[in-house]
Amino acid sequence: MPSTPSMPVVEMTGIGKSFGGVPVLRNVDLRLDSGTVVGLLGANGAGKSTLIKILSGVYSADSGTISVDGQHLGSASVTEAQRLGIRTVHQELSLVPSLRVYENVYLHAELTKGRRTPFAPLDRETMIRESRHVLRDVLGIEVDVRATVEDLPIATRQLVEIARAVHERAKVLVLDEPTTSLEAREKAQLFQVVRDLRNQGVAVIFISHHLDEVTDLCDRTIVLRDGAVVVDAPTAELSARDMVTAMTGRLVDHQYPKKQVQLGEPVLAVDGLTREPVYRDVSFVLRRGEILGVVGLAGSGKTELIRGLAGSLPAASGSVTRNGSAVRLGSIRQARRLSLIYLPSDRKVAGIFPEHSVAWNTTISALQRIMGRFGLSPARELSTVNAAIDEYGMKVSGPDQVISRLSGGNQQKVMLARSLLGNADVLLLEDPTRGIDVAAKNDVYELITSLVEAGKSVVLVSSEETEVLGMCDQILVMREGRVRANLAAGDTSLPQIRLIAMSSEGDDE
Amino acid sequence: MTSTPTVPSGRVIAPRAMAGLRRVVGLPGAGVTIAFLVLCVALAFASDYFLTVGNLTVVLRQSVWVAIMGIGMTFVIGMGEIDLSVGAILGISGLAAAIWIQSGVNIYLAVVAALLLGAVIGACNGLLVTILHLPSFVATLGAMSVLRGIIMVITGGVPVYGLRYPEFQFIGQGFIGPFPFPVVILAAVFAVFAYVLYRTPFGRHVLSIGSNAHAARLAGISLTAVRVTVFMISGLLCAIAGVILASRSEAATADAGQGMELDVIAATIIGGTVMTGGKAVLYGTVVGAMLMTTIRNGLNLLGVSPLWQQVVIGAFIIISVAGSMLASRRADGDA
Ligand SMILES: Nc1ncnc2c1ncn2[C@@H]1O[C@H](COP(=O)(O)OP(=O)(O)OP(=O)(O)O)[C@@H](O)[C@H]1O
Ligand SMILES: [Mg+2]
């Protein structure tokens, strides 16, 4: 358990940072002791990522000082921060997609035969062996380390990213929302790794929007609001309510605003949907006003299934009935014409247009809505987007702010707004609240509720089982590409779902 | 970043004026416009002849081809692709018009057919890129070579001369009021495609593909249709330039448009369009084309040898692109 060392590993004092004249961090102090895990909380746009980017040498602070182990850390340099033992997993994944897993794990830390020079021959065998060891024995996932990263699901990519940060002994480990697409089991494994590292004396910063994770893992909790520290206290002294109040400045009850909606006629029925080897023989009926949840571990086929419905990973066999007539979901465009709109979870790769504005990113798949007499109407665009900014509580400087300048959670809100603007009748949502803060999450749930009240239907794939339990009417539990159970939300419980999702092959065959 | 920027002498400039200046300099296309204006002022001082109406008309006219083709290139590069066949399409469509006219086809019909030819060749480029999944660099490099070969086979290297028909001459040499007809065509092309790029869903789709093709596909955009159309637009605009050139020189030569692809790409990039796609500055391309012609014109007026002109132009391209990228990074605030 954490000892009480005398000198902090990291000491950041009086950190200030503005972007284009807008202050993002104000006079922030952060002290990290070795062998402790510090939780960093704050609403979307509070400045969490900016703070840890300053620590990792990505940005330089406008004011304040940073010292690591008593050594002064000068102007922004990632190399220098790494040399001082700081390892960071950033919120937006930063792997090289076209490289293999082990190459990514050892990126810029390549092992060579003989002396370590840029032109020495690579020691592939050791890199492969070691990365396999880290991934399998430490992080507990089976992955072919020779696979190319772009072929991996996002949860696995996140674990590869973590492997990259932990395979070398770090002094300070920074994890910026590392759990956003992880399943319960992988989360537990990650927490075990973090605890082991802590016991070995590593100092850890852990950022999350899940209060239970912070309560579970962190010795101390710091809450940022609008770029200033509002709470810095031992976690044991804080209740979840204290944390939320500190984050938002108001009281927010976290409850799923589930309302019983009268279910209508079937809008989408699939029978025997199959695409080997990722999903097999999937059948369900989705009715008007219904929310259908799909849960399962990583690799269970749930993300592939929703992409199958979206037309981006079409089924090879099986039938689909939409509003009573047989249809094919062979491509994204075909699905969209049937008003099936898909929100991908991987916003960086599959979602945002990084150099364009919030307005552009919001309206891009519903441009017919902003047509005026002379083509696209800037005035209509402005009013549409301003409405969305209000509705989702986006923290932006204005509709013309470039999206890559937004915090991760605010980018996610733009993605949500885009998919809801597109005249959907059936929404296919993949981790819609990924990276969204506690207060805004409730708003999203309320929004989804109002959509089904208005007669839309939703398929919700999520790595958060509680979200599915709290919001859905019908729940499919998938394992190894098959639906293992089709449950009514009222008749089931978290333990039951977990049991079905995890029980090993052969139990029920 | 400091809150009170200082000039080297240490004098403090009002932060607000500085911020305003930065914002202007950071606007897309500002770099090329400033460079162009500076160059014009400098040349006006250096040569008495530069600022005459006659000379300015010459400059504008000589920019027309690169500017028109550059408008197509702006779409192509904005979409994250490249078209190396533009010079060859200009050559072959001018030649086709010349041959058809000389063989007695109605002049207007011949011109329309030549334009269609350019559009069809462009569409073929697009199909190579979308159906065969060739990188556009390779597809259009191949197309350039094939087209140049065909031109040589048809002409045997001998130009088609004598296109002295008033209706045809008008295209490249006529005037509407005080304006040379090619300049009027350029203005019309610019107006139409500025509308298409900035005011239609199609324009947004083009830039979305250049920005993030995967996300564009998931947003429901048809990559194939947009890509083929953009290459077709590029081909069509090259054909327009080809017909203007043939009309102006009253001939179609085998080497028409040779090497022009590089000028066109340079004008587009100088103008502020991002090489990797996603952002396009249409008026910047036109200014870029004028800038390049002006440099050449100015160096001629100053009596600089053509050999040295190459060196100066190359250096100018590097300096102006570097300058405008620096300015926009500054304006972004993450220097
Ligand atoms: N490069 C940048 N340029 C301009 N503004 C930026 C930039 N990066 C971040 N910001 C702004 O700084 C603020 C803080 O962003 P930051 O990413 O630190 O938030 P966060 O606390 O990590 O939020 P989230 O929970 O959504 O990840 C946001 O309002 C964001 O718009
Ligand atoms: Mg963040």
Image (spheres, coloured by chain):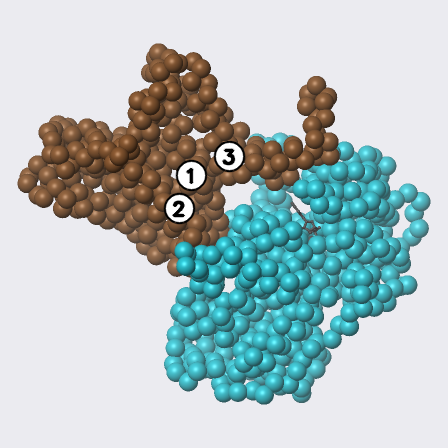
Cβ atoms under marks 3 and 2 closer than 8 Å: no
The numbered mark, 3 or 1, whose residue comes first in the sequence reads 3
Instruction: Report if residue A294 is visible in the image.
Output: no
The numbered mark, 1 or 2, whose residue comes first in the sequence reads 2
Q: Nearer the viewer, residue A364 or B30?
A: B30
- Ligand 2: quadrant of the figure: bottom right
Identity, as a three-letter code, of the amino acid under mark 3:
Ala
On the image, numbered disc 2 is attached to which residue? B194
Q: Is residue A307 above or below residue A130?
A: below
Q: Secondary structure at mark 2?
A: helix
Q: Secondary structure at mark 1?
A: helix
Cβ atoms under marks 1 and 2 closer than 8 Å: yes
- Specify whether A36 is left or right of A495: right
Q: Which mark is residue B283?
A: 1
* The colour assigned to chain A within the rendered structure: cyan
Under 8 Å from ligand 1: the CB of mark 2? no
On the image, numbered disc 3 is attached to which residue? B30
Identity, as a three-letter code, of the amino acid under mark 1:
Tyr
Circles 1 and 2 on the same subunit: yes
Q: Is residue A94 above or below residue B221?
A: above
Output the chain of dot 2.
B
Output the chain of dot 3.
B
